[in-house]
């Protein structure tokens, strides 16, 4: 029997390793950035072309490498970070496995130039698919420049599985954020297709967050800080009213390493209990410092997962720190007994005015057991007056001379019997129909109306846009700007006219007709968040998603007082819709309580 187990060639082994470590262009950028940080760089420049498929280049002013080191760094399991197994529990650097550079070289054309600060000449090394093409001395700046070209050139199946340029660019932005956020002491720049996206000088932690995500975050951040003998926590949380519908802006760092940890995420989310709107997630930028011996970072090839020696202790301290920050800034909810503001007149009492206690009038001679000659109990005069008013309210409907002129027949039911609608708890609209009582959810009904309107706009109807006398200026992260650019055609169909200025700024010059301009920024943020949430899911029509987002954002809120004319207009427009019975999310917009049910209620 011949032997069937054979040792894999190095080139094949490297490609297999690359499948675990280098999944997309953003994965290669992550490894190059971490190496630049570990090299002690104070300036790091990133150059990207075609979403990283053509070129990923990282230049740093770190310590540089000698001719021997630059050759060794592309060998598997070659590293300067650890010497023995015990060093795995004393890691202070980002990289340590010695797999990343070999994996990159296995699936790309790599050109590396490096020079130590004390050397006159550097070294230029070229590798293609793990094969060394050339190595020679060259003049270059102190530090290291590594260019990764034609990624996955020899693995076409992997290249075909890459997403669109816009999607891959967003992944690149995310990896850039993860490194730049935690190292504000390093200056970063990012250029994509010869256009400068970020130019981040050395700054404070808060300034770095604002520099990446926009000026709006300057007023949204709350500091978090807690220090114990075993753990140090420092960072920022975002005020709950700015919670996102996706988990995008949630950043945990342990010893300057970005991590994903669902258990710690629960600690933060739980601290925000009763403060977050429904279906939203808190945003945070939190850095934890622990003894390297108390964590294990060697559990995943991408190094984004760690194990804590005492995760419960970290959870408790983190939860308390976030709670403390929320409490210090008076964000905890107050007790609310649903007091109607219209009757809470004490809040509007003028200064100096005395409060007059209410007077109680009663008849001292009144005897409820006293019988009149008719044999009936005596009735107070006040009750007689109220009884007369109730009789007036419940007068029976007076039929019209021509009933057909006052009623509109609708499929399956009749229209209101009178031009009167009632609003219940500022949430429901109630009106009479032939079969009983119709109950309409004002928010869901308006969502259905707006959804069909915006869907028509997106599917080719001429857009209606009103020009802004004073254009509005908004700041977004570079990744969010790329989403807006991807959705430009649809946004213009809705009526949003805008131009981009700089790396993360847009100016809105036109908005949809009859649109509240004060909601422009909030609506654009919601569109971006919904796009992130739904991206990658098959069978999701972009027009349907955007129409639903616009309808949800702009529909009449619960608690809005409507007059009879507004309720009648909502009713009429609802039954002009193609599907008046359902909101865009599939929930019911209305319900009819039949007369039989009403009679049962009265019978008990």
Image: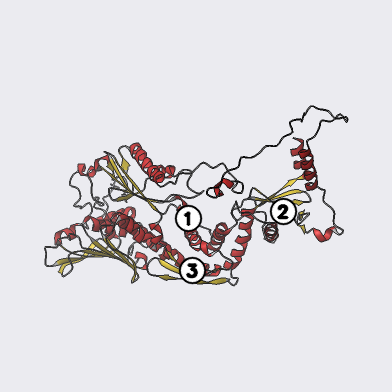
Q: Which residue is painted at 47% across and 55% down in the image?
A: 533
Q: Nearer the viewer, mark 1 or mark 2?
A: 2
Tell which of 481 and 66 is nearer to you: 481
Q: Identify residue for label 2.
A: 421
Rendering quarter of residue 388: top right
Rendering quarter of residue 52: bottom left
- The image quadrant where one finds the C terminus is top right
- Quick one: label 3 or label 1, which is nearer the N terminus? 3
Say if mark 1 contacts mark 2, CB within 8 Å.
no
Rendering quarter of residue 65: bottom left
Tell which of 312 and 525 is nearer to you: 525
Left/right placement of residue 467 relative to residue 598 reads left
Q: Which mark is residue 488?
A: 3
Q: Is residue 164 visible?
A: no
Callout 2: helix, strand or loop? loop
Q: Which mark is residue 394?
A: none
Crowdedness near tag 3: few (<14), some (14–19) or many (≥20) residues, C-alpha within 10 Å: some
Q: Is residue 277 visible?
A: yes
Give the distance between the C-alpha atoms of the residues marked 3 and 2, in whole angstroms.
Answer: 41 Å
Q: Which mark is residue 533?
A: 1
Crowdedness near tag 1: few (<14), some (14–19) or many (≥20) residues, C-alpha within 10 Å: some
Q: Nearer the viewer, mark 3 or mark 2?
A: 2
- Quick one: label 3 or label 2, which is nearer the N terminus? 2
Q: Which residue is painted at 61% across and 54% down in the image?
A: 560
Callout 1: helix, strand or loop? helix
Residue 582 percent across, percent down from the top left: 64, 54
- Quick one: label 1 or label 2, which is nearer the N terminus? 2
């Amino acid at each position: 029997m011949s032997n069937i187990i054979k040792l894999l060639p190095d080139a094949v082994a490297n490609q297999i390793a690359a499948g675990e470590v280098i999944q997309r262009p953003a994965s290669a950028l992550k490894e190059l950035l971490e190496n630049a940080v570990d090299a002690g760089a104070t300036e790091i420049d990133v150059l990207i072309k075609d979403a990283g498929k053509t070129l990923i280049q990282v230049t740093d002013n770190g310590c540089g490498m000698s001719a021997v080191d630059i050759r060794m760094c592309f060998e598997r399991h070659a590293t300067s970070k650890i010497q023995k197994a015990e060093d795995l529990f004393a890691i202070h650097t980002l990289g340590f496995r010695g797999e990343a550079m070999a994996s990159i070289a296995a699936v790309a054309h790599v050109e590396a130039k490096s020079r130590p600060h004390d050397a006159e000449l550097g070294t230029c090394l070229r590798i293609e698919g793990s094969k060394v093409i050339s190595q020679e001395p060259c003049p270059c700046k102190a530090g290291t420049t590594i260019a990764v070209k034609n990624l996955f050139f020899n693995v076409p199946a992997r290249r075909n599985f890459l997403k669109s340029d816009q999607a891959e660019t967003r992944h690149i932005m995310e990896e850039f954020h993860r490194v730049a956020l935690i190292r504000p002491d390093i200056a970063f720049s990012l250029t994509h297709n010869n256009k400068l996206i970020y130019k981040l000088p050395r700054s404070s932690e808060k300034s770095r967050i604002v520099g990446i995500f926009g000026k709006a975050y300057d007023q949204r951040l709350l500091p978090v800080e807690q220090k114990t003998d075993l753990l140090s926590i420092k960072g920022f949380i975002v005020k709950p009213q700015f919670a996102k519908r996706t988990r995008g802006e949630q950043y945990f760092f342990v010893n300057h390493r970005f991590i994903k940890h669902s258990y710690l995420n629960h600690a933060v989310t739980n601290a925000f209990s009763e403060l977050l709107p429904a279906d939203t997630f808190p945003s945070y930028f939190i850095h934890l410092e622990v003894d390297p011996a108390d964590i294990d970072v060697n559990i995943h090839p991408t190094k984004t997962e760690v194990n804590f020696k005492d995760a419960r202790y970290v959870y408790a301290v983190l939860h308390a720190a976030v709670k403390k920050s929320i409490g210090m800034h008076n964000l905890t909810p107050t007790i609310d007994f649903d007091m109607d503001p219209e009757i809470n007149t004490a809040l509007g009492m003028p200064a100096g005015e005395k409060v007059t206690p209410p007077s109680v009038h009663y008849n001292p001679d009144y005897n409820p057991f006293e019988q009149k000659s008719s044999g009936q109990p005596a009735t107070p005069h006040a009750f007689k007056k109220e009884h007369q008013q109730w009789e007036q309210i419940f007068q029976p409907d007076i039929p019209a001379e021509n009933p057909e002129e006052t009623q509109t027949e609708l499929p399956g039911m009749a229209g209101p019997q009178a031009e009167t609608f009632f609003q219940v708890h500022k949430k429901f609209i109630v009106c009479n129909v032939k079969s009983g009582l119709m109950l309409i959810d004002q928010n869901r009904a308006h969502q259905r109306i707006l959804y069909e309107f915006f869907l028509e706009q997106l599917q080719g109807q001429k857009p209606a846009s009103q020009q802004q006398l004073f254009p509005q200026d908004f700041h977004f992260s570079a990744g969010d700007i790329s989403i807006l650019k991807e959705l430009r055609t649809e946004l213009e169909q809705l009526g949003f006219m805008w131009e981009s200025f700089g790396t993360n700024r847009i100016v809105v010059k036109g908005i949809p007709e009859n649109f509240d301009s004060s909601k422009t920024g909030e609506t654009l943020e919601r569109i971006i968040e919904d796009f992130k949430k739904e991206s990658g899911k098959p069978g999701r029509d972009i027009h349907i998603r955007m129409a639903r987002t616009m309808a949800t954002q702009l529909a009449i809120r619960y608690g809005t007082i409507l007059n009879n004319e507004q309720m009648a207009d909502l009713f009429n427009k609802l039954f002009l819709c193609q599907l008046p019975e359902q909101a865009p999310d599939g929930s019911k917009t209305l319900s009819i309580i039949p007369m039989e049910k009403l009679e049962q209620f009265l019978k008990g």
